[in-house]
């Protein structure tokens, strides 16, 4: 499936901003299951300086410096991505979760896909004993990792209420867990925290999900916005597998990955330092269109 | 220093000294099973301590008391201070009277061990952030590295500018019960304490100069000189600009940072002082952007760059990491070096030393088992009763708020089962360590020696000739008899550290007995932030002075309020309204008694405009630029705050208010004298002086509008002369009483009256002319345009014809000039805010 994605972010400032420096993670990466055919950024006012690099996790980061005073900043990311993921393995075939827990710290690698990076608390995902205890019910002795993790995903999806205004970008795991509600970012953070608490490597993935529901299927939550989900390490043989707790489904050809990391802080689409005072209004619009529709 | 020589005083030092020694050490009892520095295992006083004590005993008791008192005074005078985390006020430095004396044999072992450890750690970082063989070949588990919050994956593959990851390294050491020295932990993020060690040396060697010489204690200065040479070599340019990046005045060890910057001749900068342009790092100075070649950071790596690392950081430099990646700035230590501080790594040190250096580890470290590996975990669980359980990576035990560790033997069966379960679930977060009991050293308490546990921090610096270990260290002494971790705070003091030499130390520095401070002239360009603070210090001092004058004027007139025909009541009301408009007194105060208002306006801290509040702001401005002010200036600024904020004993007493205001005015006058006589005539002084003059011009305009309007009474004009301190000048020129045109001329225009607005503007204009210009085309910069214009306008005015609106316009032009100075020389538009503004649905 080929997707055309338009992700437009607009800031309007109450008083002029003299200068801005931003790190943008808006251009989708290519990996085993997807290929970015074409992508680009349109930024107004025109940046004095823009250069792209890969961060440690292999995400595309564009560092932008704007030194023209402005009251409005518009960042449009346009991309075409072809997605074809290998099908998810049968959960019953994956190793027992305790085997994963034993194998993870023993992996002899510090490369970006090494489970070692995803075992520990990170900037926005603290370990939270109540969340881990709650999750433990899904992890019966000897249960295959993907089966157990999928059960946890289903429980989060069932017990947590999706509610847009319930949380903020900075909401913590204990807050979201106590409230049992939030958005995709909160669902993913809670699930990651619970998995890591059990000694299992879990990563945070940002991206999109297709807008138009296929015939006969229900409309998916998180459409027309950026989306986020979880990737779980299932041992050296199966590697990283995506689970979307917001929609209770395994990540497949409906998901387009932009970036992945330890939590939201690693993949935040726009980080910036602005010189100026006063408040701003933010507007984000996302359009994901399967080609030919 | 005659008192140190035997028999120099009555009392017969020679015969008394052995008895004194006896008295001091009687009852000195080291704890059983703990090594002691003073007494060897066989119960005899160790030879180097015997020599030290014999020297000390030759000093007469009176003399000793005097010297200790002088040392205490010196600490206060130098302003040595530190801050306990979470406190706003700094504490005075607790320093032991006696140094820790270490024998040269012991020191050889320690020094060789620390030098080796520095090399080992450099090699470890070079592998982890380079080829990664230790991990891929199984010598070091990936999770033992990645678990450290100070591990910066993004630094993988980045070549450190200047070729080194580590340039300043420290390790905490202590003597174990077996008599050997042990490494307790590594410090590689931004080791603190070396500057305090230097201060301690200055104070203690100054108090005991003869003894210091006799013990042949090694000097510290060469170590710092070599460290500086190492940093200089790291830069691309031959005479690099080296910056010490501080987290700012609220950091626990800001005093030390300012001191080291001054001592080493580095530029003390905060994050806002630096800016990254086209991959290079620059300092914002009043002469524009100047290249920063080397950064010695005291900011933890995570806070160094809000754009790439912790977005919540307000103390970092956006884009710094990218500049490090491109090699445009050398940074000590490399971001990511902090991972060496993990306890998890301690268990691997012996094997890593063998593998990376092909050497046996010289100084053992605390035996440590990282529970992320199955065998080690089993070992820890099996021997839980003999173990301390601590966090593998952070300061505190995971899952606890502030506990550092747990003794296995302290756990009840239920807690024990929970601990075992935790270790099985997430063993990688924990280490088991053998229980360490620190050795003790003698401290001076109530005329006797007592044993106290200590930790010694030893420093190593990368120099052009390899690693060099500082001959001495930062010693922290706990007042608790049994201590395992000692950090500065309640019940902890520090001690100087002397390495007893067999031979006289370093012949060249033998003559001046004390450690001498290297002479450094104020270097480079004035950073914009420092200029900003100097300017505001000037403004605050002037404003405090004006407030005191108003109060004095008010109280003097209130005494004789209803004298017929004096018009005093009207003047008093105007003065009260001025204090309210000034923010020095609440609006409802206009009805209160003058004495009460005066008390609030002077000492009340609840109003931002009171003299006490203003003097606090002055003290804060001074404290962030203390490396640029003499200690006397700092002391007077503190004294001013103290004078003003002391509660008024009898609110309502005009007399007391006058006395207080005059005491403050005297301090301010002393400050002005000191500043004019003692502050270097470089750019810094210009900003301090311009701040005062801007504020004085503004205040004088305001006073002239209030008391010098067209139908001002004689009494009002008299008040005006008081407020601008020009009574005497006026009387010397005019025989008649206060007349409008003459008084106005004196307040606003008179170029010979040092209190007039015209005089202030002329001085500001001179300052601006002397400051560096940025425009290459030679055209005037905005502040100078304004000052020339204003100067000309004032020179050609006629006092008689000025009306209120013209005086107001004049005041506004002075304000505009102040704004132009800010815009040109200080940070433009405030500092950048870091934000993560978007979220995900």
Image: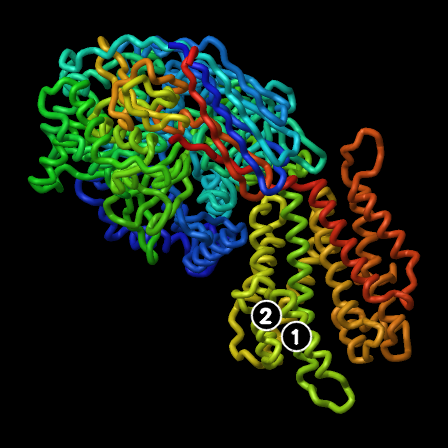
Which residue sits at x=84%, y=35%? B779
Could you say which is closer to the camera, residue B82 or residue B77? B82
Q: Position of residue A231 (x, y in %)?
A: 29, 20
- Chain ID of residue with mark 1: B
* Left or right side of A188 for B709: right
Q: Disc number at residue B585?
A: 2
**Rendered image: mark on residue B576:** 1
Identify the subunit bearing mark 2: B
- Are the two marked residues, 1 and 2, in contact with CB atoms closer than 8 angstroms? yes
Q: Nearest the camera: B437 or B583?
A: B583
Q: Residue at x 64, y 29 (%)?
A: A67
Q: Position of residue A227 (x, y in %)?
A: 37, 26
Q: Which mark is residue A94?
A: none
Task: Examine the image and state in which quarter residue A174 appears.
Answer: top left
Q: Is residue B681 above or below residue A133?
A: below
Q: Nearer the viewer, residue B747 or A235?
A: A235
Q: Position of residue A89 (x, y in %)?
A: 21, 11
Q: Give the residue drawn at x 12%, y 24%.
A: B378
Q: Position of residue A138 (x, y in %)?
A: 14, 27
Q: How is the image coloured?
A: rainbow
Mark toward the start of the polypeptide (1 vs 2)? 1
Describe the element under mark 2 as helix, strand or loop: loop
Is residue B436 visible to us here? no
Q: What is the count of numbered marks? A: 2
Residue density around tag 1, few if under 14, some if 14–19, many if 20 or more, within 10 Å: many
Q: Are marks 1 and 2 on the same chain?
A: yes
- Note whether B589 is above or below A120 in the view shown: below
In the image, B7 versus B705, the foreground residue is: B705
Kindly state the secondary structure of the residue where label 1 is placed.
helix
Residue B817 shown left or right of residue B744 in the figure: left
């Amino acid at each position: 499936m080929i997707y055309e994605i338009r992700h437009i972010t607009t800031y309007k400032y109450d008083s002029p901003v003299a200068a801005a420096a931003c790190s943008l993670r808006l251009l989708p990466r290519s990996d085993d299951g997807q290929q970015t055919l074409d992508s680009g950024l349109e930024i107004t006012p025109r940046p004095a300086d823009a250069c792209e690099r890969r961060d440690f996790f292999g995400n595309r980061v564009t560092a932008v410096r704007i030194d023209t005073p402005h009251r409005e900043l518009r960042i449009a990311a346009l991309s075409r991505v072809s997605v074809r993921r290998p099908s998810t393995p049968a959960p019953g075939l994956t190793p027992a979760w305790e085997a994963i827990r034993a194998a993870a710290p023993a992996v002899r690698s510090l490369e970006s896909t090494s489970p070692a990076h995803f075992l520990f608390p990170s900037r926005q995902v603290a370990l939270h004993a109540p969340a881990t205890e709650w999750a433990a019910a899904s992890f019966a002795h000897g249960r295959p990792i993907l089966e157990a993790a999928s059960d946890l995903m289903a429980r989060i999806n069932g017990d947590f209420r999706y509610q847009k205004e319930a949380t903020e970008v900075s909401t913590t795991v204990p807050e979201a867990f106590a409230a049992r509600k939030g958005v995709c970012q909160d669902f993913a953070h809670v699930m990651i925290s619970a998995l890591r608490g059990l000694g299992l490597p879990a990563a945070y993935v940002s991206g999109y999900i297709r807008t138009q529901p296929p015939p006969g299927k229900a409309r998916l939550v998180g459409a027309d916005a950026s989306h986020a989900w979880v990737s779980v390490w299932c041992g050296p043989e199966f590697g990283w597998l995506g689970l979307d707790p917001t929609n209770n489904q395994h990540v497949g050809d409906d998901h387009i990955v932009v970036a992945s990391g330890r939590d939201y802080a690693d993949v935040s689409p726009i980080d910036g330092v602005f010189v100026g005072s006063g408040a701003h209004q933010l507007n984000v619009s996302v359009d994901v269109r399967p080609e030919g529709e | 220093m005659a008192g140190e020589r035997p028999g120099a005083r009555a009392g017969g030092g020679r015969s008394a000294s052995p008895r004194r020694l006896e008295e001091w050490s009687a009852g000195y009892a080291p704890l059983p099973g703990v090594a002691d520095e003073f007494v060897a295992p066989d119960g005899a006083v160790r030879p180097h301590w015997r020599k030290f004590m014999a020297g000390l005993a030759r000093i007469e008791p009176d003399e000793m008391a005097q010297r200790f008192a002088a040392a205490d005074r010196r600490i206060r005078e130098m302003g040595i201070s530190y801050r306990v985390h979470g406190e706003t006020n700094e504490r005075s430095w607790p320093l032991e009277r006696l140094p820790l004396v270490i024998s040269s044999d012991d020191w050889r072992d320690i020094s060789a061990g620390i030098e080796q450890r520095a090399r080992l750690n450099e090699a470890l970082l070079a592998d982890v952030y380079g080829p990664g063989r230790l991990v891929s070949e199984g010598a070091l588990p990936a999770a033992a590295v990645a678990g450290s919050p100070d591990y910066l994956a993004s630094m993988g593959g980045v070549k450190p500018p200047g070729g080194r990851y580590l340039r300043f390294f420290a390790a905490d050491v202590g003597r174990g019960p077996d008599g050997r020295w042990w490494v307790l932990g590594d410090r590689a993020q931004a080791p603190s304490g070396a500057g305090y060690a230097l201060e301690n040396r200055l104070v203690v060697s100054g108090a005991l100069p003869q003894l210091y010489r006799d013990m042949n204690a090694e000097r510290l200065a060469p170590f710092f000189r070599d460290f500086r040479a190492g940093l200089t070599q790291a830069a691309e340019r031959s005479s690099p600009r080296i910056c010490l990046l501080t987290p700012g005045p609220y950091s626990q060890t800001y005093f030390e940072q300012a001191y080291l910057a001054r001592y080493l001749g580095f530029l003390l900068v905060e994050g806002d002082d630096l800016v990254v342009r086209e991959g290079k790092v620059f300092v914002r100075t009043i002469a524009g952007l100047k290249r920063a070649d080397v950064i010695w950071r005291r900011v933890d790596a995570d806070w160094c760059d809000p754009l790439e690392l912790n977005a919540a950081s307000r103390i970092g430099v956006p884009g710094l990491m990218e500049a490090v990646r491109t090699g445009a700035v050398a940074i000590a230590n490399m971001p990511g070096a902090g991972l060496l501080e993990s306890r998890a790594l301690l268990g691997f040190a012996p094997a890593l030393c063998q593998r990376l250096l092909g050497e046996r580890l010289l100084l053992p470290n605390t035996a440590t088992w990282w529970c992320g590996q199955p065998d080690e975990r089993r070992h820890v669980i099996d021997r839980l009763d003999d173990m301390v359980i601590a966090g593998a990576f952070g300061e505190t035990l995971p899952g606890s708020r502030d506990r550092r560790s747990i003794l296995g033997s302290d756990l009840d069966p239920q807690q024990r089962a929970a601990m075992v379960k935790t270790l099985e679930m997430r063993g990688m977060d924990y280490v088991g360590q053998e229980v360490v009991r620190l050795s003790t050293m003698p401290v001076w308490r109530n005329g006797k020696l007592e044993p106290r546990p200590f930790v010694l921090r030893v420093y190593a610096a990368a120099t052009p000739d390899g690693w060099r270990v500082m001959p001495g260290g930062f010693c922290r002494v706990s007042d608790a008899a049994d201590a395992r971790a000692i950090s500065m705070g309640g019940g902890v003091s520090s001690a100087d550290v002397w390495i007893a030499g067999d031979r006289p130390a370093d012949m060249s520095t033998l003559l001046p007995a004390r450690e001498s401070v290297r002479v450094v002239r104020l270097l480079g360009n004035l950073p914009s932030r420092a200029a900003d603070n100097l300017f505001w210090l000037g403004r605050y001092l002037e404003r405090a002075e004006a407030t005191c004058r108003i109060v004095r004027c008010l109280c003097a007139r209130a005494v004789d309020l209803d004298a017929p025909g004096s018009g005093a009541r009207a003047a008093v009301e105007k003065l009260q309204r001025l204090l309210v408009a000034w923010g020095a007194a609440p609006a409802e105060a206009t009805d209160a008694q003058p004495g009460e208002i005066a008390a609030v306006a002077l000492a009340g801290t609840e109003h931002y405009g009171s003299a006490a509040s203003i003097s606090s702001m002055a003290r804060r401005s001074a404290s962030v630029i203390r490396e640029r002010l003499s200690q006397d200036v700092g002391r007077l600024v503190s004294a001013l705050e103290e004078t003003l904020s002391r509660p008024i004993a009898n609110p309502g007493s005009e007399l007391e208010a006058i006395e207080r205001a005059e005491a403050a005015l005297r301090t301010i006058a002393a400050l002005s004298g000191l500043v004019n006589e003692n502050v270097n005539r470089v750019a810094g002084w210009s900003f301090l002086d311009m701040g005062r003059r801007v504020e004085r011009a503004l205040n004088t305009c305001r006073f002239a509008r209030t008391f010098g309007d067209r139908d001002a009474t004689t009494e009002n004009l008299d008040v005006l002369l008081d407020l601008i301190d020009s009574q005497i000048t006026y009387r010397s020129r005019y025989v008649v009483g206060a007349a409008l045109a003459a008084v106005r001329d004196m307040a606003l225009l008179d170029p010979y009256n040092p209190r007039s607005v015209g005089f202030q503007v002329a001085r500001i204009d001179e300052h601006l002319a002397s400051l560096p210009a940025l425009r290459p085309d030679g055209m005037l910069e905005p502040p100078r345009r304004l000052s020339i214009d204003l100067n000309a306008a004032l020179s050609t005015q006629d006092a008689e014809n000025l009306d209120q609106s013209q005086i107001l316009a004049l005041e506004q032009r002075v304000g505009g000039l102040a704004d132009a100075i800010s815009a040109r020389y200080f940070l433009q538009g405030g500092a950048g805010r870091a934000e993560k503004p978007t979220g995900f649905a």
